[in-house]
Amino acid sequence: MEIELTPEDVEKTVELTQAMVRVKTENPPGDEDELADPVEEYLNDLGIKTERVELEQGRSSVLGTIPGKEEGSVVLCGHLDTVRANESTWEKPPFEGIIEGNKLHGRGSADMKGGVAAILQVARLVAGSGAKPEKTIKLALTADEEHGYQGAKSLVDAGKLTDAEFLIVTEPTDGNVYLGQRGELWVEVKFHGKAAHGSIPETGINSILPGARFVLEIEKRKGELSTDASLGATSLNVGVFDGGWQINVVPDETTLKLDYRVISDDHRDEILSQVEETGEKLAEESGTEFTFRTMTYKSPIISDKTNYYIKKFFDLSENFTPEEKIGGIAPYSTDATAIVPELNIPVIIYGPGSIELAHQPNEYLDLNSLEKSLRLLAGFVRNVL
């Protein structure tokens, strides 16, 4: 299959990204159909067959299919939703897709409408080549990635990806080619004390105090977890600390929510032991009661480096972008969470932009990274598929 990438192709990809940034798909509420409609029309205009898998009214994923010569498919996956934007905290409007220099500004520019634009442009190049790929290429453009991967899960549950042999997720990777992702462990911790009047705190039991000590101690204990040269280190974010409800009342309940991104299942077991030991010790010292529960756990995903598709992608990444860092796993979770364990297939996570710019004000996409990603993805399709 001959696919030549021209400056015009790059410019069209920039324009696609810009157009998608201008469509609000903040989750919640989602409203992914606002983008799914023009995306589906775009693919249909290229002669690519599409299907919609609905989550609820106004919220759908789009699946495009380019039939191949042989059985089996390769899936290119990106999500249509974004996190919300507090416009008052942005220096530039988050939904105008303003371009200054090599930066395209806006919510979702990096996470991950640039990655979706790259998928759409690869689809256009394949359709325009007039050749049939060796394997079927499926374009999985999903809803609800930001709140639980339900769009990707719905595609799997509907049997739309059963023939998949390989998955590429075009999330922002900041120049890295990842062969998987960290696991996701969310833990809820509660300290239960005794309410009392704020003027006589000694008659109550303040639940915030052991909660505060718990945060400090559990952060230190993270250092007990081993690191790995290729996988990195398990991370911890204390995402919620909620205690008390009125200034003149001794708080009788404090809740903490911990977001661990683990590099192994062993780390999950070690962390839960740390949480239990630390919490029970502090509860005994403070006279409170301690409870905890696992809110969610998703195992790490690590693909086999010897897999045919993985090896080909790595080889091409060296050829197309020599500065790429190859191997390791993404520190964050992706739609692969809902796909890989169910289908038992390898995954590469690689796409334009930086994850450090996601989920915060003044998000932008480096257009040089968009071009590099497009060249590598198009090269993979040309040389492998």
Image: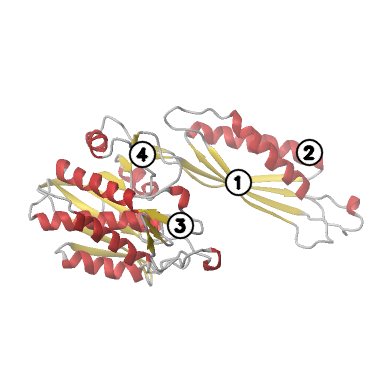
Residue at x-position 60% and y-position 34%? 222
For marks 3 and 1, the one nearer the N-term is: 1
- Can residue 117 be seen here? The reply is yes
For marks 1 and 2, the one nearer the N-term is: 2
Q: Callout 1: helix, strand or loop?
A: strand
In contact (CB < 8 Å): disc 1 and disc 2? no
Quadrant in the picture for the C terminus: top left
Marks 3 and 1, how far apart at CA: 34 Å
Residue at x-position 76% and y-position 41%? 283
Q: Which residue is mark 4?
A: 178
Q: Give the percent coordinates (x, y) of residue 160.
A: 26, 55
Q: Callout 4: helix, strand or loop?
A: loop
For marks 3 and 4, the one nearer the N-term is: 4
Q: Callout 2: helix, strand or loop?
A: helix
Q: Which residue is mark 3?
A: 363
Of the residues shown, which amino acid type is indicated by label 2?
A: Glu
